[in-house]
Image (cartoon, rainbow, N blue to C red):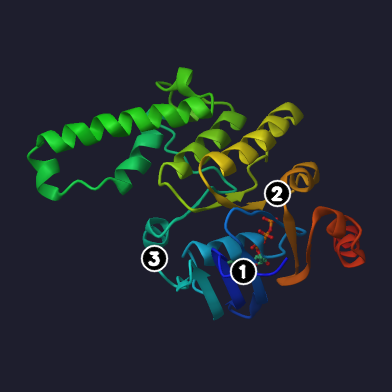
Amino acid sequence: MTATSLALLNVKQASRTFGGLKALTDVSLYLNEGELIGLIGPNGAGKTTLFNLLTGVYEPSEGQVLLSGESIGGMKPYRINWKGAARTFQNIRLFGNMTVEENVKIAFHQHAKHSVWTTFLRLPAFFKGEQEITNEALNLLKIFKLDHMKDELAKNLSYGNQRRLEIARALASRPKLLLLDEPAAGMNPNETEELMHLIRWIREEFNLTILLIEHDMGLVMGVCDRIYVLDRGMLIANGTPEMIRSNPKVIEAYLGQEA
Ligand SMILES: Nc1ncnc2c1ncn2[C@@H]1O[C@H](COP(=O)(O)OP(=O)(O)OP(=O)(O)O)[C@@H](O)[C@H]1O
């Protein structure tokens, strides 16, 4: 498959250096609208660095990142979020001392279109907005089977539930592109299986395009349309799960890691 005119994300020859270290070298990839794409590679391959370029945490040292055809390389993270990209983190970043419901509502608030005066004077539109936000937050929590825990503090949730809450919160910003950084980390096999179905389902339900970093090969091979493989900052393969599974360069990269 090649990039179509619908490519939602287009990374063109992007590189990123940290001092003398080249974390990414000349990386080009694309995600067409609606695709669910995996990004795999041994430890230190550059996967999170690539996510950081896509979400404005870092600026590419070279190359371009285009979202819906617009250059977003070096844009502030909140602006990239407004333009339709949301992410979860390898190390969960919830507000631990806030409730499950508040964690989702806060993400809605960042996108709510209240004027300063509407909010300050608490005009009717403010309360209407608040009610809508509460309803939408509860709907999202229902989808992720977290509604019965809405009043729990986020820090008291199991690891698997915290990961699901992070995804719910990312969806509150109504993204077109969802970037998931190791969503199954710390989950047991049953939770991972459930997550796999959930990821497929939210893609349809929310018209999402998804880029997924994951070490659980069962999950990646089971849900992804195509997979990109990074090794030492360079893309070494791109193709369907079947192609990637039997690719000698990929096998070598992973065997090298175990040696
Ligand atoms: N802010 C930074 N400063 C210096 N080096 C960095 C920085 N961020 C990443 N690196 C380096 O870039 C390389 C790629 O790291 P990155 O975290 O992107 O890999 P990864 O594929 O996500 O690894 P893992 O699977 O272990 O999470 C590593 O050598 C890492 O030490």
Alpha carbon of mark 1 to alpha carbon of mark 3: how far? 27 Å
Q: Residue at x 57, y 70 (%)?
A: 5
Hey, which quadrant is residue 35 in on the image? Answer: bottom right
Looking at the image, the residue that sits furthest to the left is 121
> Which of the two labelled residues, at mark 1 and mark 3, occupies the earlier sequence position?
1
Task: Look at the image and tell me whether residue 99 can be seen.
Answer: no
> Which of the two labelled residues, at mark 2 and mark 1, occupies the earlier sequence position?
1
Disc 2: which residue: 214
Q: Residue at x 43, y 26 (%)?
A: 153
Q: Quadrant of the N terminus?
A: bottom right
Q: Nearer the viewer, residue 69 or 163?
A: 69
Disc 3: which residue: 76
Disc 1: which residue: 4
Instruction: Identify the amino acid type marked 3.
Output: Lys
Q: Nearer the viewer, residue 251 or 244?
A: 244
Q: Position of residue 177 (x, y in %)?
A: 52, 54
Instruction: Identify the amino acid type marked 1.
Output: Thr
Mark 2 crowdedness (10 Å alpha carbons): few <14, some 14-19, many ≥20: many
Give above or below for 58 relative to 227.
Answer: below
Q: Position of residue 128 (x, y in %)?
A: 20, 32
Q: Nearer the viewer, residue 243 or 92?
A: 243
> Which of the two labelled residues, at mark 2 and mark 3, occupies the earlier sequence position?
3
Looking at the image, the residue that sits furthest to the front is 5
Q: Position of residue 137 (x, y in %)?
A: 38, 31
Task: Look at the image and tell me whether residue 184 can be seen.
Answer: yes
**212 lies left or right of 148:** right
Whether the residues at callouts 2 and 1 have beta carbons within 8 Å, the answer is: no
Q: Is mark 1 within 8 Å of ligand 1?
A: no
